[in-house]
Image (cartoon, rainbow, N blue to C red):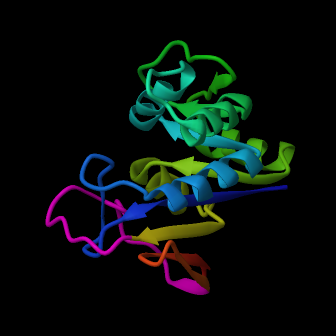
Amino acid sequence: MARLVFGMNMSLDGYVDHDAFGPSPALFRHFVAETAAQAGSLYGRRLYELMRYWDEDQPGWGPDEAAFAAAWRRQPKWVVSRTLTEVGPNATLLGADLEAEVRALKSAQKGEIEVAGPTLAADLGDLGLIDEYRIYLHPVALGRGTPFFARARPRLQLMATEVIDGAVIRLRYEPA
C-alpha cells in the first residue's frame, strides 16, 4: 500500500510561494532524489498546470534541472480537477469521487505518492488520507500568500528533523 506524503517549501510564517523563495542547489538536488524515488504524484489542477513546465526541455537548464525533468516525466501523475478534460504525458485525470479514487490508488500502488498543493492536501487530510506531512522550513517571512495548511489539521506527531544545506529544516510529521 502506498503512503501519501504532502511536502512543500514553507516560510517561517507558514506560507508557500514558489515565486518568493526557492530551493538552494543542494535542496534542489534533494528534491531530484525524492522525485526519482516516488511512486508518483497526485496534483490539483493549478499545481499540475504549473509543473507541466517540466514536460519540455528549457534553454539554460543545467544537469540538475534536466535530472529533475527526467524523474518527473518518468513518474505517473494523477490529477484532480473539475475543469480539465485532458492531461499531459504519463498523467491520469481522476474522477469525481476523490475519496474512493485515492483510496483505490493507495491500495494499488507501493511506495510514496507525493501530494502536491495545499488545497488538495487539505481535502485529503479531511478524509484521513495523508500519511505524512513534510515541511521544508526556510528562514524567510513572507507576511502573505497561500498557507501550507489550507485548513486546520488534526494533531501531528513529529517523526524526524533534518537540516538541509545549513539553512532549511525538514520537519516530518504524521497524524497523531
The structure residue drawn at horizontal position 77% and vertical position 45%, both measured from the top left corner, is 39
* Residue 48 located left or right of residue 158: left
Classify residue 142 by image quadrant: bottom left
Residue 157: x %, y % from top left? 58, 86
Residue 32, magenta (yes or no): no
Q: Report the quarter where the N terminus lies.
A: bottom right
| Residue at image coords 67%, 44% | 102
Question: Looking at the picture, how far across and down is residue 60, in whole percent?
Answer: 44, 27
Comparing 47 with 83, the one in front is 47
Looking at the picture, how far across and down is residue 58, in whole percent? Answer: 47, 22
Quick check: can you spot residue 81? no
Residue sitting nearer the eye, 29 or 51: 29
Determine the residue positioned at 60% across, 38% down. Answer: 63
Residue positioned 53% across, 61% down in the render: 26
Q: Quadrant of residue 150?
A: bottom left
Residue farthest along the top direction in this orientation:
85
User: Residue 67: x percent and y percent?
Assistant: 65, 38
Nearer-the-camera pick, 118 or 26 = 26
Would residue 158 be counted in the magenta stretch?
Answer: yes
Q: Is residue 117 left or right of residue 139?
A: right
Q: Is residue 48 above or below residue 9?
A: above
- Is residue 135 in view? yes
User: In this figure, what is the number of numbered marks?
Assistant: 0
Apparent side of residue 104 relative to residue 24 in the rendered image (left or right): right
- Which stretch is magenta? 138-159
Q: Quadrant of residue 11?
A: bottom left
For the C terminus, the quadrant is bottom right
Question: What secondary structure do most residues of the magenta stretch adopt?
Answer: loop
Q: Is residue 114 above or below residue 176?
A: above
